[in-house]
Amino acid sequence: MRAKARMSAMHFPRAVLFDLDGTLLDSAPDMLAAINAMREARGAEPMELAALRPHVSKGARAMVAASFPEVDASTRETWIPEFLDCYRAALGRFGGPFEGIEPALAAIERAGSRWGIVTNKPEALAAALMPLLGWEERCAVLIGGDSLPARKPDPLPLRVAAERMGLDIADCVYVGDDERDIVAARAAGMRSIVALWGYRLDGDDPEAWQADAMLDEPADLARPERWAT
């Protein structure tokens, strides 16, 4: 039976776990710089941010596929290391936290709660962002897509994150902008929230993901009473 989060409508849970790209961080501009470096190397015109943005939360392969739809999948697969190298060069240069994220994190901290990150981004890349954002001392736990034998939508990363923080699943809430985030939280027995400001394809239907709540903007994260809606 699914655990019930230990929080009231007026209080934060003991811990908030976040997805990174599309939830805390507007990383699409950095991703675009990486994709356009690859396109320039192949003599192609730059891609527009609006065209890439919906694919960011789906991962490197989805972004490369959206950027080079005319290239066969097996060839695109060999380009993933190049994309990661290009992204590493652009890391933190163009993107940043969504407006409202920093005040929300500060509100969580003032309440005596902790927060951490569970992302499918490679751990080394996620960890490299922490000092750039000033989060290396504030983020209580960081789990990347290659930190464990499984990644989201498998619930293992969320379970391990709670364990490393010394907390029960019921003490935590997970916030993410992709269906995989909500599927992972449900499988872990963890309360979940959809970040509606994130990256979604036109066909995505967040209501169908069956999260516990959906928030319209990052500022809502600073108001725990909104989390129960």
Image (cartoon, rainbow, N blue to C red):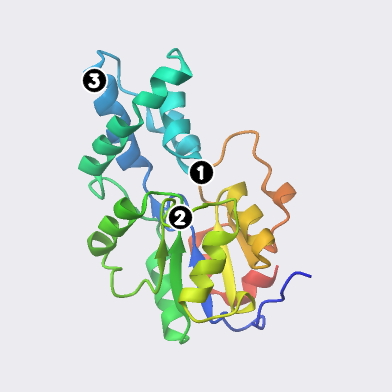
**Residue 51 visible, this orientation:** yes
Amino acid type assigned to the residue bearing label 2 in the image:
Thr
In the depicted structure, whether residue 69 falls above or below residue 21: above
Give neighbour class at mark 1: few <14, some 14-19, many 20+ (Cα, 10 Å): many
The residue at which mark 2 appears reads as 119
> Which numbered circle lies on residue 199?
1
Q: Earlier in the sequence, mark 3 or mark 1?
A: 3
Give neighbour class at mark 3: few <14, some 14-19, many 20+ (Cα, 10 Å): few
Q: Earlier in the sequence, mark 2 or mark 3?
A: 3
Contact check, label 2 and label 3, Cβ < 8 Å? no
Question: At numbered mark 1, what does the secondary structure look like: helix, strand or loop?
Answer: loop
Taking the spot 30% from the left edge, 53% from the top edge, the residue there is 124
The spot of residue 19 in percent (x, y) is 48, 57
The residue at which mark 3 appears reads as 40
Give neighbour class at mark 2: few <14, some 14-19, many 20+ (Cα, 10 Å): many
Question: At numbered mark 2, what does the secondary structure look like: helix, strand or loop?
Answer: loop
In depth, the one of 212 and 148 nearer the eye is 148
In depth, the one of 60 and 67 nearer the eye is 60
The nearer-to-camera label among 2 and 1 is 2
